[in-house]
Image: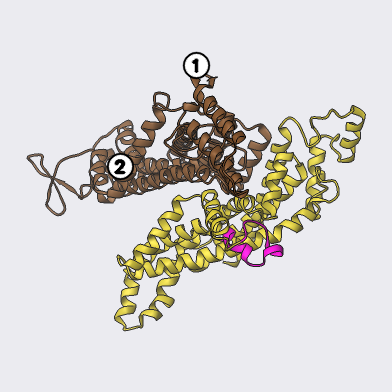
Chain colours: A yellow, B brown
Amino acid sequence: MSKYIIRRALGLIPTMLIIITVCFFLIRVAPGGPFSSEKKIPPQIMKNIEKKYHMDEPLIQQYGRYVVNVLRGDFGPSYKYKDYDVNYYIAQGLPKSLLLGTISILLAVLLGTAAGMFSALRQNTWVDYTWMSFAVVGISVPVFVLGPVLMYIFSIRLGWLPVAGWIDEHGLKALVLPVLALFYQYFATIARLSRASFLETIRSDYVRTAKAKGLKTSYIMMKHVLKGASLPVVSYLGPAFSGIITGSIVVEQIFRVPGLGRHFVQSAFNRDYTMIMGTVIVYSLILVIMNFLVDVLYGYLDPRISYS
Amino acid sequence: MSNTIKTDNNKMYNELNQPVKGVSLWLDAWRRLRKNKMAMGGLVVMIVYAAIALSAGLLPIYSFNQQVLDHQYLPPSSRSAGELLIEQKVELLSAFAAKEERELNKVELGQIEKLKERVATEKKVLLTGEEILVHQRVYHLGTDELGRDLLARIIYGGQVSIMIGLVGALASMFIGVVLGALSGYIGGRFDSIMMRFVDIMYSLPYMLLVIIMMAIFGKNILNLFFALAVVSWLTVCRVVRGQIMSLKNSEFVEAARASGASTRRIVFKHLIPNTMSVIVVYTTLRVPAFIMLEAFLSFLGLGVQAPYASWGVLIHDGVYAMTTYPWMLWYPATVMTLFLFSMNFLGDGLRDALDPQSKNKL
């Protein structure tokens, strides 16, 4: 097992390198650049600008320079915002995005599993129907519909919560709507998944044996069912993480959260090469590390899987 | 087929000894699908949407890009735009007058009369070339910031969205099935190279790549298709490969081979139909995913560009206007959500109906 973990962890390095390489060249092959604007810049000045950012060098050399810098933890200067470098913007935005994403995924997993469990235990009762109708709505309503609708109802009409902004202005209230919008779809999927898998596990032979031994229901649920039934949920976590990341980009747009997602979209529009690369690398790093942890957790939960 | 027993007079019974007609996979699935009320409801909604989207040109609706700047932000109503304009003017002037605690004065009454006259007579040449009394137009779902009819924009936007969903799903299905079947059937080195490639593609954060591609290579529909197709065939490929590999060595294929069936017969009569159900279900479930993806990009301003609309574009516009003109959000959002709902139910129903385990069971 530990051998597998080490090998899998080392596998993250080439993955990240591939991501960096693909992104780097994808961005560079397109015509135009961060300095091509409406206003015509005299060629001499253009040359100086390009020289300053090493853009007059061959692409391969630029790539090598960039990779070395990234390994040192330096994402370079922003091409659009002259005053700060990319590290500054990432340090500004990342904590906010991380907070939003972490709360959402934790709530989705905890509430989703709980909803699935109660629905399975009370199958075909009103408890089941209530939770599952919540889940069906969640699966079909995309985040960019849910966000504005929530905002309209709770902020504009009822005025209970701030329309937009972040904790520094509004306190914890500012988190409620973004988290709701972001977590709902994943809560819904997890609730449906875990309901199905709880139902299956409850009927399995080893749970029947446990019941026949006269164990208490709560004990069986915690000791036997929960572990077995959580497998599909764990394997869904990978897609959920990447969904939360893309979802947070939209949620940050809607609720004006000054997080990483807004920098990412803005930089894609601006052709701010280093900024795009920086945000993509940070997002990808989070994603591959999460997927790695999910794989390890999966192996720990399911002893039938052998890693050799 | 495994749970059907054939008797000598060619009648078939399932394992519960109920007589069953020999039916094709699809007829059997259709019988089961018909029993699923939610899925049938979804199917009906889908057909209605498809009919409206296909016949959009024939319907008595306005053009989706005809701007009438006098008709900005008119609320949904079955009365003509002219009546609404007059009503708005009277309301506004009366409010002023009420504030000053007086009746409407001569100047104001004159203004209203003038507007009434304008409404009754003003003509405008439309983009189509015909000249109409412009204030006679009726906007059942209201208008947007450029005075365009929201109903027409939702219908034509639906056309674009549904087309993107279908084309995207079909393209990704085609690439995925071909590569997946090849990979599964040929096996060996080709298979391992393919799967390595798929693994690498999987590890890329593809939504981020799509966003970058759209932002950098230009925001037209062709690029959108390309970007979506590049990233979306992976799962189909894996699923089909897995199916083909597991079926390749299964008993019924062996039995077919033992009774002398040709390779072609095995592939077309046994392997493909058995993977087909998975493919159909997956494609159905992909359609809403693609529509959501397109809407997601449009929401960020990277999808379909003006003057064309898609549901994502309309929702995006609606968000900015919702404080004062909430209908601009509600109608497109409802239309799109209903569509996604029905697609999801239909996909779930198809999955249950095409499940080979339930063959010949009612």
Tell me what residue is drawn at x 66 percent, y 32 percent. Answer: B217
Q: Is residue A116 visible?
A: yes
> What amino acid type should be assigned to the residue bearing mark 1?
Glu
> What amino acid type should be assigned to the residue bearing mark 2?
Val
Tell me what residue is drawn at x 56 percent, y 57 percent. Answer: A182
The residue nearer to you, when weighing A104 against B104, is B104
Direction from residue B361 to residue A2 in the image, left or right:
right
Residue B209, quarter of the rendered image: top right
Q: Using the numbered discs, state the Cα–Cα distance from disc 2 to disc 1 in whole angstroms.
A: 65 Å
Rendered image: mark on residue B17: none
The boundaries of the magenta stretch are: A162-179
Residue at image mark 2: B253
Rendered image: mark on residue B130: 1
Q: Main secondary structure of the magenta part?
A: helix
Relative to A32, residue B8 above or below:
below
Relative to A90, residue B224 above or below:
above
Q: Label 2 is found on which chain of the structure?
A: B
Q: Is residue A296 visible?
A: no
The residue nearer to you, when weighing B219 against A29, is B219
Tell me what residue is drawn at x 32 percent, y 38 percent. Answer: B273
| Element type where label 1 sits in the image | loop
Direction from residue B109 to residue A33 in the image, left or right:
right
Q: Are marks 2 and 1 on the same chain?
A: yes
